[in-house]
Image (cartoon, rainbow, N blue to C red):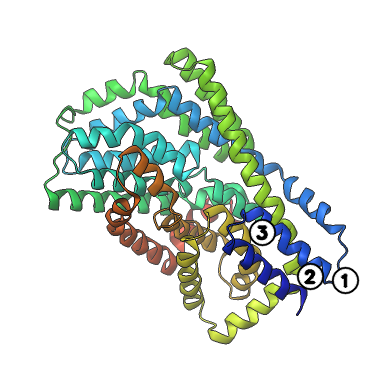
Amino acid sequence: MSPLEIALLVMVAMFLLGMPIFMGLIISAASALLFSDILPLSIMHNSLFDGLNLFPLLAIPCFVVAGSLMEFGNITNQIVDVVKMIVGRMHGGMGITTILACTFFAAISGSGPGTVAAVGTILIPAMIRNGYSKDYAAAAASSGGTIGVLIPPSNPMIIYAILGNLSVTAMFTAGFIPGFLVAFIMCSTAYFIAKKNGFAGDADAPPFSFSALCKKICGKAFFALMTPVLILGSIYTGWATPVEASVVGIVWALFVGIIINRALRWEHIYKSLLEGAMICGGVLLIVGASTLFGKILTYEEAPQRLVELVLGISTNPNVVLLMIIAVLYLLGMFMETLATIIILVPVLLPVILKLGIDPIHFGIILVITNNVAMLTPPLGVNLFVSARITPISVERVSMAVLPYIAALTVAILIVTFFPAIATWLPYTLGYGN
C-alpha cells in the first residue's frame, strides 16, 4: 500500500472510532510518514507551525468575542426590536423577525450556532408566547442561524480564503448578494408556513410607522445598528484589514455595552473572552493538523489523481459542481463545517481551477452548501442549540426544518447556475482581481 492509501484508511478508521478530527488527521499523517521513504518525520512540527502561523486566523476569535459582547451588552435586543417594528405584525412576523435578526447579527459574529443562541434565546420564547408552535419557532431560529456563515464576516470564508490563497475581503464581498438571497428565500418560507398554519404576527408589536421607526433608529438603537456598518465599512473602505476590523468590533461592542446601554459587566467580558479562546483553540488545532495532512496529500499527488478521476467522469463544470454539492450534503451530516472546508479545499481546488471555475464562485457554493450541514442530523449543530432553547427533541426540529432545507437547496442551485450572483460584486469593486 502507498503512504496515501495508508493515510486515508487510518483517517477513516479514526473518524469511525469517534476520534477528534485534529487527532485523526495527525495520526493518519504520522502513519503515512512512517511508511514513506521520501518524507522525513521532521515535517510534522514544521507543518503544524505553518498551519498556526497565519495572521488572518486572528479574526475568528475576535469576531466571536464581538458577537458575544453584543449579546451581553443588549445590542442584540435592540436589533430585534427594530426588525420587529418593520415585520412583526405580518403572518409569521416573529419567524421573519428571527431570520432578519439573524442576518443582522451574522454581520458581527460570523458564527452559525452563535447566531442561533443569541437571537433564539430572545425570540423562541416570544414566538411560543404569541401562539406559534414550538416546532415552527425552533425551525425558524435554526434556519436563520445558517446565514451566519454566509453574510460577512464569516469564519468559514476566512478559512477558505487562507487555504485558497484568496483575498478575505473578496470573499466577504462575494457573500453579500447570496446572503441576502438566502435570507429572502428563508423569510418567504417562514411566511408561507406561518400562513398555512394560521400563525399571526406579534400581537405586542406596534403598527408600522415610519416616524416611529426613525425615532427608534435615531435613539439608542442607532449605536447597535451602526455595529455592522462600522465593522464592514472599515474593511471595504480600506481603513482596516479584516483582522483589525474584528478588533474594532470588540472595542465598539464594549463602548456600546458599557457606556451607552450600561449592560456589560466584568463577568460578561470574561465569558466572552473565554468563548473566543475556546473556539480559537479548536480552530487552530484543526487548521494545524490539516496543514500537515495537506502536505502528505500534495507529496503523494492526491489532487492530481482526483483531477484525473473527476475529468474521467465529466468535464462539464456544472455537472462537477453538482457532484461536489452532493458529496458535501452527505459529509455535512457527519463533519463540522470548518473541518469539511479544511480537509476538502486543498483537494478540490485544483479540480475547480482545471475546469476554469472561478474560485470565488466555488467558495460561495462551498459555504452555502455547508449551511445545510447545520440543519442535518446527526451533527447539525443549529438543531441542538434551538432544541435546547425551545425545549423539544432534536428529531422534531429536524422534521420542522425540512422546508428550509428545500429552500436552501433552491438557493444553492441558483448560485451554482448563475455565477455572477457571487462574482459580480467583488470584481466590480476590484477585490477579485
**Given this view, does label 3 or label 1 mark the residue nearer the observer?**
3
In the picture, which quadrant includes the N terminus? bottom right
* In contact (CB < 8 Å): disc 3 and disc 1: no
Report the front residue among 432 and 148: 148
Q: Which residue is located at x 39 percent, y 41 percent?
A: 116
Q: Residue at x 84, y 71 (%)?
A: 36
Residue 169, image x, y percentages: 58, 47
Q: Are marks 1 and 2 in contact (CB under 8 Å)?
A: yes
Residue at position x 65%, y 65% in the image: 11
Viewer-closest of 235 and 7: 7
Q: Regarding mark 2 in the picture, which secondary structure is present there? A: helix
Q: Dot 3, crowdedness within 10 Å: few (<14), some or many (≥20)?
A: many
Q: Which residue is mark 2?
A: 299
Q: Residue at x 52, y 45 (%)?
A: 154
Q: Can you identify the residue that label 1 sits on?
A: 38
Q: CA distance from mark 1 to mark 2?
A: 9 Å
Q: Amino acid at mark 3?
A: Gly
Position of the C terminus by quadrant: bottom right
Q: Amino acid at mark 2?
A: Tyr
- Taking depth in this image into account, of 216 and 80 the one nearest to the observer is 80
Which dot marks residue 249? none
Q: Amino acid at mark 1?
A: Ile
Residue receiving disc 3? 24
Q: Secondary structure at mark 1?
A: loop
Badge 3 marks a residue whose secondary structure is helix
Q: Residues within 10 Å of mark 1 (few under 14, many from 20)?
A: few
Residue with the most extreme bottom position: 312
* Extreme-front residue of the structure: 17
Q: Nearer the viewer, mark 3 or mark 2?
A: 3
In which image quadrant can residue 371 be found? bottom left
Quick check: 76 left or right of 311?
left
Compared to residue 430, the image places residue 267 above or below, namely above
